[in-house]
Image (cartoon, rainbow, N blue to C red):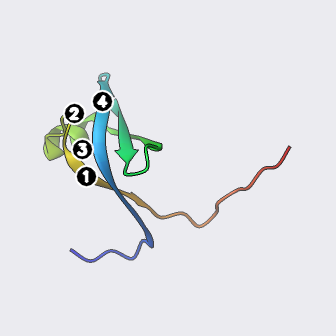
Amino acid sequence: MGLSARNDLAGTVTAIKKDEITAEVVVELGDGQTVTSTITRGSADRLDLAEGDEVSAVIKASEVMIAKE
C-alpha cells in the first residue's frame, strides 16, 4: 500500500481504550517513546486492534506547531 504521508512510525500497540464512538490507541515506538491516536471505534474494530499488535502510526499534517518555554 502506498501513502502520501511522509511520517510512518513503526511500533507496538501497548494500550487501547474504547468507548461507544472512539478508541484511544497508544503505540510504543522502538526508542520507548509513545504516540497516542484517537480513531473511531469502528476503525479499531475493523482493524481488529489488540495490545501487542505491530502497527504503523501514519502522520499526515499540513501544520505542525513548535513551542518553547
Q: Quadrant of residue 56?
A: bottom left
Mark 3 vs mark 2, foreground winner is 2
> Mark 2 and mark 3 in contact (Cβ < 8 Å)?
no
Cα distance between the residues tagged 3 and 4: 12 Å
Q: What residue did someone put label 4 on?
A: 16
Q: What residue did someone put label 2 on?
A: 51
Q: Quadrant of residue 65?
A: bottom right
- Taking the spot 33% from the left edge, 74% from the top edge, the residue there is 3
Image quarter of the C terminus = top right
Cα distance between the residues tagged 2 and 1: 10 Å
* N-terminal label among 4 and 2: 4
Q: Secondary structure at mark 1?
A: strand
Q: What residue did someone put label 3 on?
A: 43
* N-terminal label among 3 and 2: 3
- Taking the spot 29% from the left edge, 23% from the top edge, the residue there is 20
Q: What residue did someone put label 1 on?
A: 55
Mark 4 vs mark 2, foreground winner is 2
Q: Quadrant of residue 32?
A: top left
Image quarter of the N terminus = bottom left
Cα distance between the residues tagged 1 and 3: 14 Å
* N-terminal label among 3 and 4: 4
* N-terminal label among 1 and 3: 3
The crowding category of the residue bearing disc 3, from other C-alpha atoms within 10 Å (few below 14, some 14 to 19, many at least 20), is few
In the rendered image, residue 38, in percent from the top left (x then y), is placed at: 41, 39
In the rendered image, residue 34, in percent from the top left (x then y), is placed at: 45, 42
Q: Would you place residue 53 above or below residue 7 in this image?
A: above
